[in-house]
Protein backbone atom coordinates (compact mmCIF):
# COMPACT_ATOMS: atom_id res chain seq x y z
CA UNK A 1 0.00 0.00 0.00
CA UNK A 2 1.22 3.49 -0.77
CA UNK A 3 2.52 5.64 2.06
CA UNK A 4 -0.07 8.27 2.87
CA UNK A 5 -0.62 11.09 5.32
CA UNK A 6 -3.61 11.23 7.65
CA UNK A 7 -5.84 12.39 4.81
CA UNK A 8 -4.98 9.44 2.55
CA UNK A 9 -2.99 11.60 0.09
CA UNK A 10 0.03 10.07 -1.62
CA UNK A 11 3.52 11.09 -0.44
CA UNK A 12 5.72 10.72 -3.54
CA UNK A 13 4.04 9.80 -6.78
CA UNK A 14 6.35 6.84 -7.33
CA UNK A 15 4.37 5.08 -4.61
CA UNK A 16 1.32 4.72 -6.86
CA UNK A 17 3.07 2.30 -9.17
CA UNK A 18 2.16 -1.33 -8.73
CA UNK A 19 -1.13 -3.18 -9.01
CA UNK A 20 -4.50 -2.13 -7.60
CA UNK A 21 -7.95 -3.68 -7.42
CA UNK A 22 -9.56 -0.47 -8.68
CA UNK A 23 -8.04 2.50 -10.47
CA UNK A 24 -10.44 5.43 -10.89
CA UNK A 25 -9.38 8.24 -13.22
CA UNK A 26 -10.81 11.61 -12.17
CA UNK A 27 -11.81 12.71 -8.67
CA UNK A 28 -14.85 14.77 -9.63
CA UNK A 29 -18.56 14.50 -9.00
CA UNK A 30 -18.78 10.84 -10.05
CA UNK A 31 -15.22 9.63 -9.42
CA UNK A 32 -14.87 10.87 -5.84
CA UNK A 33 -18.31 9.46 -5.02
CA UNK A 34 -17.40 6.07 -6.49
CA UNK A 35 -14.02 5.93 -4.76
CA UNK A 36 -15.47 6.87 -1.39
CA UNK A 37 -18.15 4.21 -1.61
CA UNK A 38 -15.87 1.45 -2.93
CA UNK A 39 -13.34 2.10 -0.17
CA UNK A 40 -15.98 1.12 2.40
CA UNK A 41 -14.87 -2.43 1.57
CA UNK A 42 -11.61 -2.42 3.56
CA UNK A 43 -10.37 -5.45 1.65
CA UNK A 44 -10.36 -3.56 -1.67
CA UNK A 45 -7.37 -1.46 -2.77
CA UNK A 46 -8.71 1.66 -4.50
CA UNK A 47 -6.48 4.24 -6.20
CA UNK A 48 -8.10 7.55 -7.17
CA UNK A 49 -6.08 9.63 -9.66
CA UNK A 50 -6.67 13.34 -10.26
CA UNK A 51 -4.92 15.53 -12.83
CA UNK A 52 -5.37 18.63 -10.69
CA UNK A 53 -4.32 19.45 -7.14
CA UNK A 54 -5.60 17.73 -4.05
CA UNK A 55 -6.40 20.94 -2.19
CA UNK A 56 -9.23 23.04 -3.66
CA UNK A 57 -11.73 20.25 -3.24
CA UNK A 58 -10.83 19.88 0.43
CA UNK A 59 -11.46 23.55 1.21
CA UNK A 60 -14.58 24.45 -0.76
CA UNK A 61 -15.56 28.11 -0.92
CA UNK A 62 -18.82 29.91 -0.91
CA UNK A 63 -21.44 28.28 -3.15
CA UNK A 64 -22.05 31.75 -4.56
CA UNK A 65 -18.55 32.20 -5.93
CA UNK A 66 -17.90 29.74 -8.76
CA UNK A 67 -14.17 29.27 -9.26
CA UNK A 68 -13.36 30.18 -12.86
CA UNK A 69 -9.57 29.98 -12.73
CA UNK A 70 -6.85 28.10 -10.88
CA UNK A 71 -8.75 24.85 -10.39
CA UNK A 72 -9.98 24.24 -13.92
CA UNK A 73 -8.96 22.75 -17.23
CA UNK A 74 -7.81 25.59 -19.44
CA UNK A 75 -10.01 24.50 -22.34
CA UNK A 76 -11.68 26.68 -24.90
CA UNK A 77 -14.60 25.52 -27.00
CA UNK A 78 -15.97 26.51 -30.36
CA UNK A 79 -19.52 27.69 -29.80
CA UNK A 80 -20.36 26.38 -33.27
CA UNK A 81 -18.18 24.26 -35.56
CA UNK A 82 -14.47 25.01 -35.86
CA UNK A 83 -14.64 25.18 -39.63
CA UNK A 84 -17.71 27.41 -39.72
CA UNK A 85 -17.61 29.58 -36.61
CA UNK A 86 -14.38 30.88 -35.14
CA UNK A 87 -16.12 32.11 -31.97
CA UNK A 88 -14.53 30.46 -28.96
CA UNK A 89 -15.59 30.42 -25.34
CA UNK A 90 -13.59 29.52 -22.20
CA UNK A 91 -14.63 26.06 -21.10
CA UNK A 92 -13.73 25.88 -17.42
CA UNK A 93 -14.61 22.44 -16.07
CA UNK A 94 -13.10 21.37 -12.75
CA UNK A 95 -9.48 20.18 -12.51
CA UNK A 96 -9.09 19.49 -8.81
CA UNK A 97 -10.13 16.87 -6.28
CA UNK A 98 -13.89 17.33 -6.17
CA UNK A 99 -13.91 18.26 -9.88
CA UNK A 100 -16.67 20.56 -11.01
CA UNK A 101 -18.50 19.97 -7.72
CA UNK A 102 -15.68 21.95 -6.06
CA UNK A 103 -15.84 24.95 -8.40
CA UNK A 104 -19.45 25.27 -9.59
CA UNK A 105 -22.45 27.18 -8.26
CA UNK A 106 -23.60 24.33 -5.97
CA UNK A 107 -27.09 23.90 -7.44
CA UNK A 108 -28.40 20.55 -6.18
CA UNK A 109 -31.23 19.96 -8.65
CA UNK A 110 -32.42 16.55 -9.76
CA UNK A 111 -33.48 15.81 -13.29
CA UNK A 112 -37.16 15.12 -13.95
CA UNK A 113 -38.60 11.58 -13.82
CA UNK A 114 -39.23 11.68 -17.58
CA UNK A 115 -35.52 12.25 -18.23
CA UNK A 116 -34.60 8.90 -16.72
CA UNK A 117 -37.58 7.05 -18.14
CA UNK A 118 -36.28 8.18 -21.54
CA UNK A 119 -32.91 6.61 -20.73
CA UNK A 120 -34.72 3.35 -19.99
CA UNK A 121 -36.70 3.50 -23.25
CA UNK A 122 -33.42 4.03 -25.13
CA UNK A 123 -32.30 0.52 -24.15
CA UNK A 124 -31.21 1.02 -20.53
CA UNK A 125 -34.05 -0.45 -18.43
CA UNK A 126 -32.05 -0.13 -15.20
CA UNK A 127 -32.26 3.67 -15.46
CA UNK A 128 -35.96 4.38 -15.13
CA UNK A 129 -36.97 6.98 -12.55
CA UNK A 130 -38.21 4.25 -10.22
CA UNK A 131 -34.75 2.62 -10.35
CA UNK A 132 -32.66 5.78 -9.86
CA UNK A 133 -34.72 7.51 -7.15
CA UNK A 134 -33.23 5.37 -4.33
CA UNK A 135 -29.76 6.65 -5.25
CA UNK A 136 -30.85 10.28 -5.24
CA UNK A 137 -32.29 9.59 -1.79
CA UNK A 138 -29.12 7.82 -0.66
CA UNK A 139 -26.78 10.67 -1.59
CA UNK A 140 -28.59 13.52 0.15
CA UNK A 141 -29.34 14.90 3.55
CA UNK A 142 -32.15 17.37 2.89
CA UNK A 143 -32.56 19.70 5.84
CA UNK A 144 -35.79 21.28 4.62
CA UNK A 145 -37.94 18.61 2.98
CA UNK A 146 -38.72 15.25 4.55
CA UNK A 147 -40.61 12.25 3.26
CA UNK A 148 -40.13 9.12 1.15
CA UNK A 149 -38.67 11.01 -1.84
CA UNK A 150 -35.86 12.62 0.15
CA UNK A 151 -32.84 11.46 2.11
CA UNK A 152 -32.01 12.58 5.63
CA UNK A 153 -28.61 11.01 6.31
CA UNK A 154 -26.69 11.00 3.01
CA UNK A 155 -23.24 12.58 2.47
CA UNK A 156 -24.48 15.61 0.46
CA UNK A 157 -26.28 18.31 2.47
CA UNK A 158 -29.10 20.01 0.57
CA UNK A 159 -30.82 23.19 1.68
CA UNK A 160 -32.82 26.16 0.44
CA UNK A 161 -33.44 29.72 1.51
CA UNK A 162 -36.88 30.51 2.85
CA UNK A 163 -38.93 33.24 1.18
CA UNK A 164 -38.50 35.59 4.12
CA UNK A 165 -34.72 35.46 3.51
CA UNK A 166 -34.99 36.55 -0.14
CA UNK A 167 -33.63 39.88 -1.23
CA UNK A 168 -35.64 42.33 -3.36
CA UNK A 169 -34.68 40.89 -6.76
CA UNK A 170 -35.37 37.31 -5.70
CA UNK A 171 -38.77 38.22 -4.27
CA UNK A 172 -39.55 40.26 -7.39
CA UNK A 173 -38.52 37.34 -9.59
CA UNK A 174 -41.04 35.02 -7.93
CA UNK A 175 -43.79 37.63 -8.25
CA UNK A 176 -42.90 38.12 -11.93
CA UNK A 177 -43.11 34.35 -12.44
CA UNK A 178 -46.60 34.32 -10.96
CA UNK A 179 -47.57 37.00 -13.48
CA UNK A 180 -46.41 34.56 -16.19
CA UNK A 181 -48.69 31.90 -14.72
CA UNK A 182 -45.85 29.97 -13.05
CA UNK A 183 -46.84 28.92 -9.55
CA UNK A 184 -44.47 29.16 -6.58
CA UNK A 185 -43.42 25.73 -5.25
CA UNK A 186 -41.50 24.82 -2.12
CA UNK A 187 -39.52 21.86 -3.50
CA UNK A 188 -38.19 21.85 -7.06
CA UNK A 189 -36.79 18.34 -6.42
CA UNK A 190 -40.21 16.79 -5.82
CA UNK A 191 -40.97 14.11 -8.42
CA UNK A 192 -44.39 15.58 -9.08
CA UNK A 193 -43.06 19.13 -9.45
CA UNK A 194 -42.42 19.62 -13.15
CA UNK A 195 -43.34 23.27 -13.73
CA UNK A 196 -42.89 25.83 -10.97
CA UNK A 197 -40.77 28.59 -9.46
CA UNK A 198 -39.12 28.41 -6.10
CA UNK A 199 -35.99 28.41 -3.95
CA UNK A 200 -32.91 26.76 -5.44
CA UNK A 201 -31.79 23.61 -3.59
CA UNK A 202 -28.04 23.85 -3.00
CA UNK A 203 -25.34 21.48 -1.79
CA UNK A 204 -24.06 23.79 0.93
CA UNK A 205 -23.63 23.83 4.66
CA UNK A 206 -22.87 26.82 6.85
CA UNK A 207 -22.49 29.03 3.79
CA UNK A 208 -19.88 26.71 2.24
CA UNK A 209 -20.09 24.67 -0.94
CA UNK A 210 -19.87 20.95 -0.11
CA UNK A 211 -18.09 19.15 -2.93
CA UNK A 212 -17.72 15.39 -3.35
CA UNK A 213 -14.19 15.82 -1.95
CA UNK A 214 -15.71 16.85 1.36
CA UNK A 215 -18.84 14.70 1.24
CA UNK A 216 -17.30 11.40 0.11
CA UNK A 217 -13.50 11.54 0.38
CA UNK A 218 -12.94 13.38 3.66
CA UNK A 219 -14.66 10.63 5.69
CA UNK A 220 -12.70 7.96 3.78
CA UNK A 221 -9.16 9.41 3.89
CA UNK A 222 -8.18 7.38 6.95
CA UNK A 223 -9.11 4.06 5.35
CA UNK A 224 -6.22 1.82 4.24
CA UNK A 225 -8.41 0.85 1.28
CA UNK A 226 -8.21 4.31 -0.35
CA UNK A 227 -5.29 6.21 -1.84
CA UNK A 228 -5.76 9.60 -3.53
CA UNK A 229 -3.10 10.99 -5.87
CA UNK A 230 -3.29 14.57 -7.14
CA UNK A 231 -1.25 16.02 -10.01
CA UNK A 232 -1.44 12.68 -11.79
CA UNK A 233 -2.73 13.00 -15.37
CA UNK A 234 -3.73 9.76 -17.05
CA UNK A 235 -2.85 9.76 -20.73
CA UNK A 236 -4.17 6.37 -21.81
CA UNK A 237 -5.56 3.03 -20.73
CA UNK A 238 -3.24 0.03 -21.11
CA UNK A 239 -4.55 -3.14 -22.73
CA UNK A 240 -3.52 -6.77 -22.97
CA UNK A 241 -5.45 -7.74 -26.07
CA UNK A 242 -8.94 -6.43 -25.44
CA UNK A 243 -8.65 -6.38 -21.64
CA UNK A 244 -7.80 -3.20 -19.75
CA UNK A 245 -4.91 -3.93 -17.39
CA UNK A 246 -4.00 -0.47 -16.09
CA UNK A 247 -3.21 3.10 -17.08
CA UNK A 248 -0.26 5.19 -18.16
CA UNK A 249 0.03 8.56 -16.45
CA UNK A 250 2.26 11.58 -16.01
CA UNK A 251 3.06 12.09 -12.34
CA UNK A 252 5.86 14.01 -10.72
CA UNK A 253 7.12 15.02 -14.15
CA UNK A 254 7.63 11.47 -15.39
CA UNK A 255 5.56 8.70 -16.97
CA UNK A 256 4.30 5.92 -14.71
CA UNK A 257 2.47 2.69 -15.44
CA UNK A 258 -0.16 1.53 -12.97
CA UNK A 259 -1.76 -1.90 -13.05
CA UNK A 260 -5.38 -2.61 -12.17
CA UNK A 261 -7.94 -5.37 -12.07
CA UNK A 262 -10.43 -2.76 -13.25
CA UNK A 263 -10.11 0.76 -14.62
CA UNK A 264 -12.91 3.30 -14.35
CA UNK A 265 -12.78 6.55 -16.30
CA UNK A 266 -14.51 9.40 -14.44
CA UNK A 267 -12.63 12.26 -16.10
CA UNK A 268 -15.77 14.05 -17.30
CA UNK A 269 -17.42 14.44 -20.67
CA UNK A 270 -14.34 16.18 -22.10
CA UNK A 271 -11.55 14.26 -20.36
CA UNK A 272 -13.01 10.77 -20.66
CA UNK A 273 -13.43 10.69 -24.46
CA UNK A 274 -9.96 12.22 -24.79
CA UNK A 275 -8.44 9.32 -22.81
CA UNK A 276 -10.55 6.77 -24.66
CA UNK A 277 -9.44 8.06 -28.05
CA UNK A 278 -5.75 8.08 -27.08
CA UNK A 279 -6.21 4.51 -25.85
CA UNK A 280 -7.52 3.24 -29.19
CA UNK A 281 -11.24 3.29 -28.44
CA UNK A 282 -13.25 5.35 -30.90
CA UNK A 283 -14.01 5.68 -34.61
CA UNK A 284 -11.52 3.31 -36.23
CA UNK A 285 -10.76 5.39 -39.34
CA UNK A 286 -10.23 8.59 -37.34
CA UNK A 287 -7.88 6.79 -34.95
CA UNK A 288 -5.80 5.40 -37.80
CA UNK A 289 -5.43 8.86 -39.32
CA UNK A 290 -3.92 9.97 -36.01
CA UNK A 291 -1.58 6.98 -35.94
CA UNK A 292 -3.43 5.29 -33.07
CA UNK A 293 -4.00 1.55 -33.31
CA UNK A 294 -7.71 0.81 -32.75
CA UNK A 295 -8.52 -1.53 -29.88
CA UNK A 296 -12.29 -1.25 -30.36
CA UNK A 297 -14.20 0.55 -33.10
CA UNK A 298 -16.63 2.73 -31.15
CA UNK A 299 -17.95 5.60 -33.30
CA UNK A 300 -19.81 7.12 -30.36
CA UNK A 301 -16.66 8.13 -28.47
CA UNK A 302 -16.52 11.93 -28.51
CA UNK A 303 -19.79 12.24 -30.44
CA UNK A 304 -23.14 13.42 -29.09
CA UNK A 305 -21.65 16.22 -26.96
CA UNK A 306 -24.55 17.93 -25.19
CA UNK A 307 -24.78 21.21 -23.30
CA UNK A 308 -27.45 23.35 -21.69
CA UNK A 309 -27.29 26.49 -23.87
CA UNK A 310 -27.98 29.79 -22.14
CA UNK A 311 -29.17 33.20 -23.28
CA UNK A 312 -28.70 35.83 -20.58
CA UNK A 313 -29.91 39.34 -19.93
CA UNK A 314 -27.22 41.19 -17.95
CA UNK A 315 -28.00 44.28 -15.96
CA UNK A 316 -27.24 46.61 -13.07
CA UNK A 317 -29.59 46.65 -10.08
CA UNK A 318 -31.11 49.91 -8.91
CA UNK A 319 -29.96 51.09 -5.47
CA UNK A 320 -31.26 48.63 -2.91
CA UNK A 321 -31.96 45.95 -5.53
CA UNK A 322 -29.09 43.77 -4.27
CA UNK A 323 -28.25 43.43 -0.59
CA UNK A 324 -24.66 43.01 0.66
CA UNK A 325 -23.81 39.35 1.17
CA UNK A 326 -26.92 38.18 -0.63
CA UNK A 327 -26.51 34.73 -2.28
CA UNK A 328 -26.14 34.65 -6.05
CA UNK A 329 -28.44 31.64 -6.52
CA UNK A 330 -31.71 31.96 -4.67
CA UNK A 331 -34.57 31.26 -7.09
CA UNK A 332 -35.35 29.74 -10.46
CA UNK A 333 -38.36 28.69 -12.50
CA UNK A 334 -38.81 25.56 -14.59
CA UNK A 335 -41.21 26.32 -17.45
CA UNK A 336 -42.41 25.04 -20.81
CA UNK A 337 -41.58 27.16 -23.87
CA UNK A 338 -44.59 25.98 -25.89
CA UNK A 339 -46.77 24.25 -23.32
CA UNK A 340 -46.47 20.66 -22.15
CA UNK A 341 -43.21 19.29 -20.75
CA UNK A 342 -40.89 21.84 -19.12
CA UNK A 343 -37.87 22.58 -21.28
CA UNK A 344 -36.47 25.84 -19.87
CA UNK A 345 -35.00 27.04 -16.63
CA UNK A 346 -35.41 30.75 -15.98
CA UNK A 347 -32.84 31.70 -13.36
CA UNK A 348 -31.94 34.83 -11.45
CA UNK A 349 -28.19 35.11 -10.80
CA UNK A 350 -27.95 37.91 -8.28
CA UNK A 351 -25.27 40.03 -6.62
CA UNK A 352 -22.55 39.25 -9.19
CA UNK A 353 -19.21 40.83 -8.38
CA UNK A 354 -15.58 39.82 -8.74
CA UNK A 355 -16.22 37.12 -11.34
CA UNK A 356 -14.28 37.08 -14.60
CA UNK A 357 -17.33 36.56 -16.80
CA UNK A 358 -16.64 36.20 -20.53
CA UNK A 359 -18.25 38.96 -22.65
CA UNK A 360 -19.32 40.98 -19.58
CA UNK A 361 -15.94 41.59 -17.93
CA UNK A 362 -15.51 44.88 -19.81
CA UNK A 363 -19.11 45.96 -19.27
CA UNK A 364 -19.57 45.48 -15.54
CA UNK A 365 -16.17 47.11 -14.85
CA UNK A 366 -16.14 45.95 -11.25
CA UNK A 367 -19.72 46.96 -10.50
CA UNK A 368 -22.19 44.57 -8.91
CA UNK A 369 -24.53 43.15 -11.52
CA UNK A 370 -27.19 40.52 -12.00
CA UNK A 371 -28.42 38.37 -14.83
CA UNK A 372 -31.57 36.59 -15.89
CA UNK A 373 -30.81 33.32 -17.68
CA UNK A 374 -32.94 31.23 -20.02
CA UNK A 375 -31.35 27.77 -20.09
CA UNK A 376 -32.59 25.13 -22.53
CA UNK A 377 -32.93 21.85 -20.65
CA UNK A 378 -33.59 19.49 -23.56
CA UNK A 379 -31.35 20.62 -26.43
CA UNK A 380 -31.43 18.83 -29.77
CA UNK A 381 -28.11 20.29 -30.92
CA UNK A 382 -25.07 18.04 -30.63
CA UNK A 383 -21.35 18.78 -30.67
CA UNK A 384 -18.21 16.69 -30.47
CA UNK A 385 -14.86 16.13 -28.76
CA UNK A 386 -12.02 15.06 -31.04
CA UNK A 387 -8.21 14.98 -31.00
CA UNK A 388 -5.81 17.12 -32.98
CA UNK A 389 -3.00 14.62 -32.43
CA UNK A 390 -2.11 11.41 -30.67
CA UNK A 391 0.38 12.92 -28.21
CA UNK A 392 -0.47 13.25 -24.51
CA UNK A 393 -0.23 17.05 -24.67
CA UNK A 394 -2.49 17.51 -27.71
CA UNK A 395 -5.51 19.56 -26.65
CA UNK A 396 -8.97 18.24 -27.47
CA UNK A 397 -11.05 20.03 -30.09
CA UNK A 398 -14.37 20.91 -28.45
CA UNK A 399 -17.16 21.89 -30.85
CA UNK A 400 -20.32 22.70 -28.90
CA UNK A 401 -22.53 23.63 -31.89
CA UNK A 402 -24.90 25.41 -29.52
CA UNK A 403 -28.29 26.27 -30.99
CA UNK A 404 -27.33 24.66 -34.30
CA UNK A 405 -30.75 23.00 -34.38
CA UNK A 406 -33.45 25.54 -35.38
CA UNK A 407 -35.85 24.17 -32.78
CA UNK A 408 -33.36 25.01 -30.03
CA UNK A 409 -33.20 28.59 -31.31
CA UNK A 410 -36.99 28.91 -31.28
CA UNK A 411 -37.23 27.71 -27.68
CA UNK A 412 -34.43 30.01 -26.52
CA UNK A 413 -36.27 32.86 -28.25
CA UNK A 414 -39.37 31.99 -26.23
CA UNK A 415 -37.31 31.95 -23.03
CA UNK A 416 -35.76 35.33 -23.86
CA UNK A 417 -39.21 36.83 -24.41
CA UNK A 418 -40.28 35.56 -20.97
CA UNK A 419 -37.22 37.08 -19.32
CA UNK A 420 -37.74 40.41 -21.07
CA UNK A 421 -41.36 40.53 -19.98
CA UNK A 422 -40.26 39.86 -16.41
CA UNK A 423 -37.47 42.47 -16.51
CA UNK A 424 -39.84 45.12 -17.89
CA UNK A 425 -42.73 44.21 -15.61
CA UNK A 426 -43.94 45.96 -12.48
CA UNK A 427 -42.14 43.66 -10.02
CA UNK A 428 -38.59 43.82 -11.40
CA UNK A 429 -38.43 47.07 -13.40
CA UNK A 430 -38.25 49.32 -10.30
CA UNK A 431 -35.30 47.22 -9.07
CA UNK A 432 -33.32 47.45 -12.32
CA UNK A 433 -31.14 50.42 -13.25
CA UNK A 434 -30.41 49.16 -16.76
CA UNK A 435 -30.20 46.05 -18.93
CA UNK A 436 -27.23 45.81 -21.28
CA UNK A 437 -27.36 45.02 -25.02
CA UNK A 438 -31.06 44.09 -25.27
CA UNK A 439 -33.86 46.44 -26.36
CA UNK A 440 -37.63 46.22 -26.90
CA UNK A 441 -37.06 46.19 -30.65
CA UNK A 442 -34.55 43.31 -30.48
CA UNK A 443 -36.95 41.14 -28.51
CA UNK A 444 -40.11 42.04 -30.43
CA UNK A 445 -38.67 41.60 -33.94
CA UNK A 446 -38.49 37.84 -34.62
CA UNK A 447 -35.63 38.02 -37.12
CA UNK A 448 -33.56 40.31 -34.88
CA UNK A 449 -34.24 38.09 -31.86
CA UNK A 450 -33.24 34.98 -33.79
CA UNK A 451 -29.93 36.58 -34.75
CA UNK A 452 -29.35 37.82 -31.19
CA UNK A 453 -29.97 34.39 -29.68
CA UNK A 454 -27.52 32.79 -32.13
CA UNK A 455 -24.95 35.48 -31.36
CA UNK A 456 -25.23 35.58 -27.57
CA UNK A 457 -25.87 31.90 -26.78
CA UNK A 458 -23.25 30.47 -24.43
CA UNK A 459 -22.65 27.22 -22.53
CA UNK A 460 -23.50 26.33 -18.93
CA UNK A 461 -20.31 24.24 -18.52
CA UNK A 462 -22.51 21.12 -18.30
CA UNK A 463 -20.89 18.79 -20.87
CA UNK A 464 -22.44 15.34 -21.23
CA UNK A 465 -23.08 12.49 -23.65
CA UNK A 466 -19.67 11.79 -25.22
CA UNK A 467 -19.66 8.07 -24.31
CA UNK A 468 -23.35 7.24 -24.07
CA UNK A 469 -24.85 4.13 -22.53
CA UNK A 470 -26.91 1.80 -24.63
CA UNK A 471 -27.12 -1.77 -25.90
CA UNK A 472 -24.29 -3.24 -27.98
CA UNK A 473 -26.66 -3.30 -30.96
CA UNK A 474 -26.58 0.52 -31.00
CA UNK A 475 -23.69 1.73 -33.15
CA UNK A 476 -23.39 4.96 -31.18
CA UNK A 477 -23.39 3.35 -27.70
CA UNK A 478 -20.04 3.23 -25.88
CA UNK A 479 -21.01 1.56 -22.59
CA UNK A 480 -23.75 -0.78 -21.46
CA UNK A 481 -26.24 0.14 -18.77
CA UNK A 482 -23.76 -0.98 -16.09
CA UNK A 483 -21.07 1.39 -17.41
CA UNK A 484 -18.96 -1.37 -19.05
CA UNK A 485 -17.25 -0.29 -22.28
CA UNK A 486 -18.42 -2.30 -25.28
CA UNK A 487 -15.87 -4.47 -27.07
CA UNK A 488 -13.37 -4.67 -24.19
CA UNK A 489 -13.28 -5.94 -20.61
CA UNK A 490 -12.01 -4.49 -17.36
CA UNK A 491 -12.99 -0.90 -18.28
CA UNK A 492 -15.90 1.28 -17.20
CA UNK A 493 -16.97 4.89 -17.74
CA UNK A 494 -18.77 6.53 -14.83
CA UNK A 495 -19.46 10.23 -15.37
CA UNK A 496 -21.68 12.55 -17.39
CA UNK A 497 -20.23 11.11 -20.61
CA UNK A 498 -22.66 8.19 -20.38
CA UNK A 499 -25.85 10.26 -20.25
CA UNK A 500 -27.95 9.42 -23.35
CA UNK A 501 -29.88 12.69 -23.05
CA UNK A 502 -29.51 15.72 -20.81
CA UNK A 503 -31.20 15.77 -17.41
CA UNK A 504 -33.51 18.75 -16.99
CA UNK A 505 -31.17 20.24 -14.39
CA UNK A 506 -27.50 21.08 -13.89
CA UNK A 507 -25.59 17.82 -14.26
CA UNK A 508 -23.76 17.74 -10.91
CA UNK A 509 -26.34 15.95 -8.75
CA UNK A 510 -27.06 13.40 -11.48
CA UNK A 511 -23.31 12.76 -11.84
CA UNK A 512 -23.09 12.07 -8.10
CA UNK A 513 -26.03 9.68 -8.47
CA UNK A 514 -24.09 7.87 -11.24
CA UNK A 515 -21.20 7.32 -8.83
CA UNK A 516 -23.56 5.95 -6.19
CA UNK A 517 -25.14 3.61 -8.73
CA UNK A 518 -21.77 2.38 -10.04
CA UNK A 519 -20.63 1.58 -6.51
CA UNK A 520 -23.67 -0.65 -6.07
CA UNK A 521 -22.49 -2.69 -9.08
CA UNK A 522 -19.14 -3.58 -7.60
CA UNK A 523 -18.66 -6.82 -9.50
Image (cartoon, helix red, strand yellow):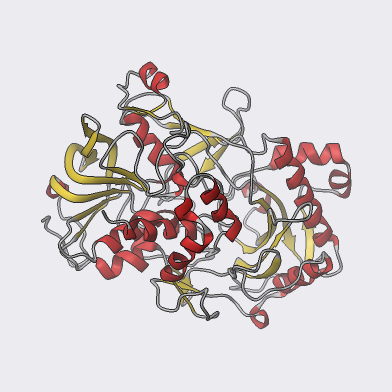
Q: Nearer the viewer, residue 87 or 174?
A: 174
Q: Is residue 263 left or right of residue 504?
A: left
Q: Residue furthest bottom?
A: 164
Q: Nearer the viewer, residue 513 or 248?
A: 513
Residue 427 lies in quadrant: bottom right
Image location (x, y in percent) of residue 319: 75, 70
78 is higher (above) or lower (below) than 366: above
83 is higher (above) or lower (below) than 382: above
Q: Nearer the viewer, residue 137 or 449?
A: 137
Q: How many marks?
A: 0
Please give the name of the residue rendered at 33% of the width and 60% of the height, measured from the top-left corner: 520
Image location (x, y in percent) of residue 176: 80, 67
Image location (x, y in percent) of residue 170: 70, 71
Residue 210 lies in quadrant: bottom left
Q: Is residue 452 left or right of residue 259?
A: right
- State whether residue 406 appears in this view: yes
- State whether residue 319 appears in this view: no
- Please state, as top left, top right, bottom left or bottom right, where the N terminus lies in the image: bottom left
Please give the name of the residue rendered at 59% of the width and 68% of the height, measured from the top-left corner: 191
Q: Nearer the viewer, residue 131 or 314?
A: 131
Image location (x, y in percent) of residue 391: 32, 26
Please give the name of the residue rendered at 88% of the width and 49% of the height, measured from the top-left corner: 440
Q: Is residue 293 left or right of residue 448?
A: left
Q: Is residue 130 left or right of residue 172?
A: left
Amino acid sequence: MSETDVRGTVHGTERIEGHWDEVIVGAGSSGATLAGRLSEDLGRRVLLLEAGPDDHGGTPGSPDNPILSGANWDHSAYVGKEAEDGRRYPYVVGRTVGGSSAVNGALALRGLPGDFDAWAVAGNPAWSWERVLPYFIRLESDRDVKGPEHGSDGPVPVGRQSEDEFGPLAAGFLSACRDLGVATVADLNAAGCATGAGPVPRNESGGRRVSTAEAYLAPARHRPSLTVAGHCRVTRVLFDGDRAVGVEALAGGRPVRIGADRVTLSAGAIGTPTVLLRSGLGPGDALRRLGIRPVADLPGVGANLMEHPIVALWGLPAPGGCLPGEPMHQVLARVASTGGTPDLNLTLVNNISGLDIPVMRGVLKGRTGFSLHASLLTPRSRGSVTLRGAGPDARPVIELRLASDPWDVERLMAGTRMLWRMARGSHLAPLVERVFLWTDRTVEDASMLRRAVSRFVCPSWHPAGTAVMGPATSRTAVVDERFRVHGVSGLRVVDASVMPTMPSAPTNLTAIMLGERAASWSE
